[in-house]
Amino acid sequence: GSNSFTADGPCLIVSNDLAVSAYTVIDGKLYLSDREKLLSVPVSGGFTTVLADGLAGDAEGKIAVDANHVYLLANGDGSDEVVRVPLTGGTVEILASAGSIDGIAVDDDNIFWLDAWAGELRTTPKLGGPVATAATNVYVGDRMIVRDGYLYFPGSQAINRIPLGGPFPASPASIPLGYYPTDFAVGPSDVFFASTELVARIPLSGGGLVELATGQKSAEVLTIDDSWVYYAPSYAGPP
């Protein structure tokens, strides 16, 4: 489903018959994983294109896009792997691995992910290089977002952020939500989040919460573009 920033009402882009595990929207296209394949579809409607298959991906939020690639999680042999695929489809490239990975994000030069077993945010250059620890004592993951010089990730009834430029390991600052976020996105001036039956936004600078959709079917897997909030339920079923 989707909803505008002003709560005009939802519209369907991809059927609930597809088991959406992770997705994001960029340049008019929806990129999504169904735990086995990476696909793309125009947000205005059209045919679905398979970009890669046999990924064995898992869990919502573990997807990111830059100008050339889609980055997502795949289950390797006894570990989780951060992989990337060209936006037009092609070879799956393995970039990093750990026992359990929650969340992926990219900036112009680096990849970030959460090593869930260690409770630490990791980072490494896209072109290869050493792995560094960006933050410690982090145990809530899935979605991580890079925006305007910060890396955002969920906390307990809050969204946390650290500066991309370090120094690392960094101490996170928190944006209180008053709800446990099931997923979130960051706009120019607001955090957008889902929490069970609620989709809402709250200013980055602090302030009142604005409800965008209520009474949803366990709203999860949320992202935004310039005008709309996109979200999917955690299970298929009637509205």
Image: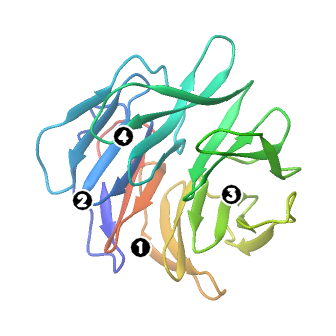
- Visible in this render: residue 58? no
Residues under labels 4 and 3: Cα distance? 21 Å
In the rendered structure, which amino acid carries the disc numbered 4?
Leu
The residue identified by callout 3 is 154
The residue identified by callout 1 is 212
Residue 32 - label: 4
Residues under labels 2 and 4: Cα distance? 13 Å
In the rendered structure, which amino acid carries the disc numbered 3?
Pro
Q: Nearer the viewer, mark 3 or mark 1?
A: 3
Q: Residue at x 60, y 87 (%)?
A: 208
In the rendered structure, which amino acid carries the disc numbered 1?
Leu
Q: Are marks 2 and 1 in contact (CB under 8 Å)?
A: no
Task: Tell me if mark 1 has few (under 14), some (14-19) or many (20+) residues whose alpha carbon lies within 10 angstroms of its own.
Answer: many
Residue 59 in the image: state x and y as whole percent: 54, 34
Residue 91 in which image quadrant: top left
User: 190 or 124: which is nearer to us?
Assistant: 124
Q: Earlier in the sequence, mark 2 or mark 1?
A: 2
